[in-house]
Image: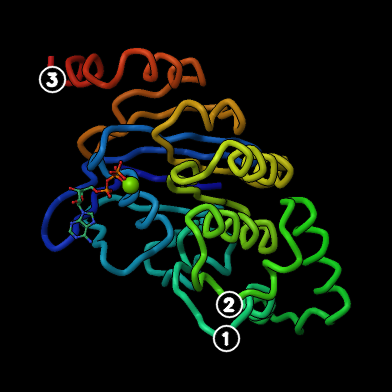
Amino acid sequence: MLKINNLHASVEDKSILKGINLEINPGEVHAIMGPNGSGKSTLASVIAGKEDYEVTQGNITFEGNDIDELAAEERAHKGIFLSFQYPVEIPGVSVTNFMKTAINETRKAKGLEDMPAKDMLKLIREKAELLEIDRKFLSRSLNEGFSGGEKKRNEIFQMAMLEPKLAILDETDSGLDIDALRIVANGVNKLKSKDNAVLVITHYQRLLDYIVPDFVHVLYNGKIVKSGTKELAHELEEKGYDWIKEEVNA
Ligand SMILES: Nc1ncnc2c1ncn2[C@@H]1O[C@H](COP(=O)(O)OP(=O)(O)OP(=O)(O)O)[C@@H](O)[C@H]1O
Ligand SMILES: [Mg+2]
């Protein structure tokens, strides 16, 4: 599904990603961990096609096609979802209306007509229930006065509605209380199928108890320096990153 080959990327001429290789197949859950500033969010942004980042070497293919030339919006239409993609506050636009627009835009890009209002309502109800989202929440203005946890929940709601092929969740655990964490993880797990994949970026092993990864990768200084299974996340929780830094620098 996603293939990253020797990816180098920089921001404002500062080199941040220094040769990333990663392959994600349908049905897989990958977790990326790593110290602050190692390039995790940058990697997520580069995959999603955010403009501030310049790919200086290597490439990314999605379902067999090179996506390097595609704008973020086009990548989203192809089924790549990045949490935090729409962090904007839009006064006067409800969560529901925002979702309607987002869904119909995606359909339009695929040459489909708008989703009939009845189906849309059904979908919204279904997904809101799945994520235990309150009806009242759906009529609130997008992100306006949302708490950290509400923002996160809204992101997962967007993901559930859009049903992306590849969902990239960056730091979905920060700011969530235990119940919200469980709901968010549940939503991700219920969305999982043999046809889609999830890339979750996290600092905490805790989240990976809920969203169990098939692979865990450690990003350090712009490179994936270690890959393993969920046991690696436990090892990191226990020992921190120093031993990995030592291994890399040895
Ligand atoms: N838009 C930007 N402008 C300038 N520097 C940037 C920008 N984005 C990222 N960087 C720099 O790139 C490096 C990697 O940042 P990135 O956000 O990818 O790290 P991270 O692994 O996600 O860290 P954290 O665990 O703290 O979230 C940092 O040194 C950061 O300051
Ligand atoms: Mg980050």
Residue drawn 52% across the image and 83% down it: 91
Identify the element where label 2 is drawn.
strand
Q: How is the image coloured?
A: rainbow
Mark 2 Cβ inside 8 Å of ligand 2: no
Residue 77 as seen in the image, left or right of residue 16: right
Q: Which residue is disc 2 drawn over?
A: 141
Residue 61 as seen in the image, left or right of residue 19: right
Q: Disc 3 and disc 2: Cα gap in Å?
A: 49 Å
Residue 18 as seen in the image, left or right of residue 97: left
Which quarter of the picture shows residue 6?
top left
Residue drawn 66% across the image and 63% down it: 162
Relative depth, front residue between 234 and 174: 174
Q: Are marks 1 and 2 in contact (CB under 8 Å)?
A: yes
Q: Disc 3 and disc 1: Cα gap in Å?
A: 53 Å
Q: What amino acid is found at the position of numbered circle 3 in the picture? A: Asn
Q: Mark 3 or mark 2: which comes first in sequence?
A: 2
Relative depth, front residue between 172 and 147: 147
Q: Which residue is disc 1 drawn over?
A: 92
Which quarter of the picture shows residue 26?
top right
State the count of labels: 3
Q: Which residue is disc 3 drawn over?
A: 249
Residue 101 as seen in the image, left or right of residue 146: right
**Label 3: how many Cα within 10 Å (few below 14, some 14–19, many 20+):** few
Which circle, 3 or 2, is nearer the viewer?
2
> Looking at the picture, how far across and down is residue 168, in whole percent?
50, 50
**Label 1: how many Cα within 10 Å (few below 14, some 14–19, many 20+):** few
